[in-house]
Image (cartoon, rainbow, N blue to C red):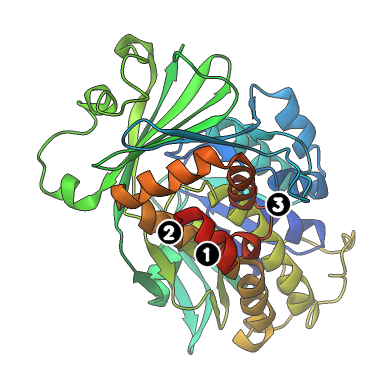
Amino acid sequence: MTRWDAIVVGAGPAGSTTALLLARAGASVLLLDRARFPRHKACSEYLSPATTPILERLGAGVLAAIEGATHAKLYGMKVVAPSGVVMCGRFASDHGHVPPRPYSFALSRAMFDTILLRAAAREGAVVHEGATVEELVWDGRAVAGVVVRWRNGQRATCNARVVVGADGLHSVVARRLGLVRTSPPRRIAFTTHVTDVAGVDGVGELHVGERGYVGLGPIGGGVTTVALVVPRSMVRRRRQDFRAGFFAELERYPGLAGRFERRRLVREVLATGPFGQWARRPAGDGALLVGDAADFFDPFTGQGIYAALRGAELAADCLIPALASRVRGLSGRSDPGRKPGVHRGGGPVTAALLEPYVRARRREFAGKWALERLIGLGVGWPALAERVVGRLARRPGLADLLVGATGNFVPARRVLAPSVLARLLW
């Protein structure tokens, strides 16, 4: 019977990276995505500084492809309070933590995701685009595969020892497992690409307002990603069409007024959300969640792509020995005598074998989750945002520390220390 070691649902950064690492280790991997690549995604399109070492570790020409593609380099982050007060933090600083490079990359998800997808295919993952996963297949209480609808409309059952849900914020895998949980604040993002934005100067920008916030940053070729994030309640009340009124809404922010021309729009406005969603548990018998399918709180800190890539590494670190416990030849290098997709024994990977992944995620992300949630809640309280941004504007060293923590190369515990939190408020 044809059976895969792993079926990865979703070919974004989390899914393609997981598939690449598993295939490189000798696993038979089926990578499925309902989209056809290249495709655009509603995203900040920012790769925090700590993503660079991960891209280097991936090999397969990934980092070289990014450097050779149209991209931008960001050297820090700027936050503008509702009153117009500005703080700016730089990645390169004297706080004792050196970033991998003094800049981060930023590039279109259409380009970035395609680079990772092609790298996974080169390592041996079997890729099917235009393939929609509709249901999970069960073997008792364990996941044993998926029901997929191919792009020609036909349905098929694909079996595997483990199904990796990397299918994003609205993960079918997480929903079918019954693991999805939500928490406030619930926000919606509208994103687009605009050319020739005035005043873009090599740093990302976050503009906090009374009704939400706006993030923007260059992605190369004179193009800037612009994201408008508002409470879901405003969208549900349908007071206005945020797509049609996108630029009018930007004019409400002191640091953005007059910087855009509507005719410079080069990509339609895409929407995503609501955020504030997480899985009660990121793994169970025969299934594992990674990337936004496992956790996504709010895009303000730009953690998404880093969490996807690092989470994929943690997933592969756990899955490779778990799969190898029943299948010979899965030891970190390809087995040339093995035919991909051929069943060679072993049932679904048990929750006990996936427990190291659960613990590793907690160790890796607990501090970042706490920091991300504190910032996300603070952004929704304009008076608090005004106070904190004012403090950071007067204390550039502290601003550098906070930006380094959100860039994932300064430990979150540095910012969560009571003495540092006190300096942010008083």
Q: Dot 1: what SS? A: helix
- At 62% from the left edge and 81% from the top edge, which residue is drawn? 348
Q: Could you give the CA–CA distance between mark 2 and mark 1, rounded to whole angstroms?
A: 8 Å
Q: Quadrant of residue 325?
A: bottom right
Asked if residue 242 is positioned above or below residue 152 in the image, the reply reads above
Image position of 94 (left or right of 294):
right
The one of 383 and 145 positioned closer to us in this rendering:
383
Q: Could you give the CA–CA distance between mark 3 and mark 1, rounded to whole angstroms?
A: 15 Å
Asked if residue 202 is positioned above or below residue 31 in the image, the reply reads above
Q: Could you give the CA–CA distance between mark 2 and mark 3, rounded to whole angstroms?
A: 20 Å
- At 34% from the left edge and 35% from the top edge, which residue is drawn? 270
Query: Local crowd at mark 2 within 10 Å, few (<14), some, or many (≥20)?
Result: many
| Tag 1 residue | 369
**What's the residue type where badge 1 is placed?**
Trp
**What's the residue type where badge 2 is placed?**
Phe
Q: Nearer the viewer, mark 2 or mark 1?
A: 1
Q: Quadrant of residue 327?
A: bottom right
Q: Nearer the viewer, mark 2 or mark 3?
A: 3
Q: Position of residue 260 (x, y in %)?
A: 35, 15
Query: Local crowd at mark 3 within 10 Å, few (<14), some, or many (≥20)?
Result: some
- At 74% from the left edge and 35% from the top edge, which residue is drawn? 102
Asked if residue 386 is positioned above or below residue 216 in the image, the reply reads below
Identify the mark nearer the N-term, 2 or 3. 2
The answer to whether any part of residue 289 appears in the image is: yes
Q: Dot 3: what SS? A: loop
| Numbered circle sitting on residue 297 | 2
Q: Position of residue 165 (x, y in %)?
A: 52, 64
Q: Dot 2: what SS? A: loop
Q: Quadrant of residue 235?
A: top left
The one of 24 and 364 positioned closer to us in this rendering:
364
Asked if residue 364 is positioned above or below residue 346 in the image, the reply reads above
Q: Position of residue 162 (x, y in %)?
A: 61, 73
